Image (tube, rainbow, N blue to C red):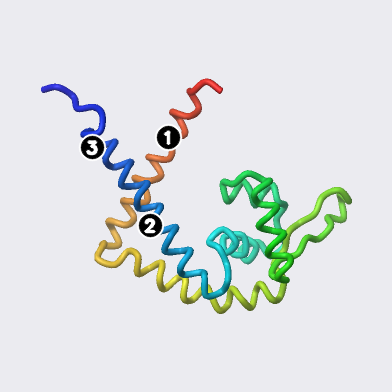
Amino acid sequence: MRARSGEDHPGYRALMELLRTADTVWNASRVFFERWDLSPSQFNVLNLLHLNPAGLSQTDLSRQLIMHRSNLTGLVDRLEKRGLAARREVAADRRAYSVVLTAAGARLLRDILPRYYEDAARVWDRLPVRRAAELIADLQQVARNAQHIADKLPR
C-alpha cells in the first residue's frame, strides 16, 4: 500500500483543522474581551501579571506570550495608559524595569476571570475530561515535532 502524501494525508488535514480551530478560538476570544475593551493579548499580559505579583520584565512577558518584544511594548503602553499595568524600576538595575499589575488591573481581572474560566470550560463541552487530557498531550507532542522541524531548517 502506498503512503499518502499531500493534502489528503491525515497529518496535513489535522494540521489545517488545528489552525482553523486556533483561529476560531482567537476570534471568539476577541468577542469575549470586547465588553472590557481588551484584546486577547492584553488580557494575556494582565493574567500573567496576576500570576506573577512581583512583576515580570518585558523580555519575560514576551517569552511567555511567544511574542516579539517590540510587539509587547505597544501592549504594555496601552495597558499602562489605561492604568491597568505599570512599569516599575528594578532597584538592582536602574536600566531595567518590571511590569506589574495595578490595583485597577486587579479589579478588572476579578470581574473577568470567573466568566473567562466558565466559558473556557464550556469550550470543552461534549468532550470527556479524559479525552481533553489526551488532547493536551497530543498537542504538546505536535508542538515538539514542529519545533524539531523548525530547528533543522536553515536560517
The residue lying furthest to the left in this view is 1
User: Residue drawn at (78%, 60%), measured in percent from left and top?
Assistant: 87
Which circle marks residue 10 in the picture? 3
Which is in the foreground here, disc 1 or disc 2?
A: 2
Q: Are marks 1 and 3 in contact (CB under 8 Å)?
A: no
Q: Position of residue 151 (x, y in %)?
A: 50, 27
Distance from label 1 to label 3 (Cα)?
16 Å
Horizontal arrangement in the rendering, residue 91 relative to residue 67 (left or right) = right
User: Residue drawn at (59%, 73%), measured in percent from left and top?
Assistant: 109
| Residue at disc 1, secondary structure | helix
Nearer-N-terminus badge (1/3): 3
Which is in the foreground here, disc 2 or disc 3?
A: 2
Front residue of 117/20: it is 20
| On screen, residue 66 above or below 5 | below
Which circle marks residue 24 in the picture? 2
Q: Residues within 10 Å of mark 3 (few under 14, many from 20)?
A: few
Q: Which residue is mark 1?
A: 146
| On screen, residue 151 above or below 128 | above
Nearer-N-terminus badge (2/3): 3
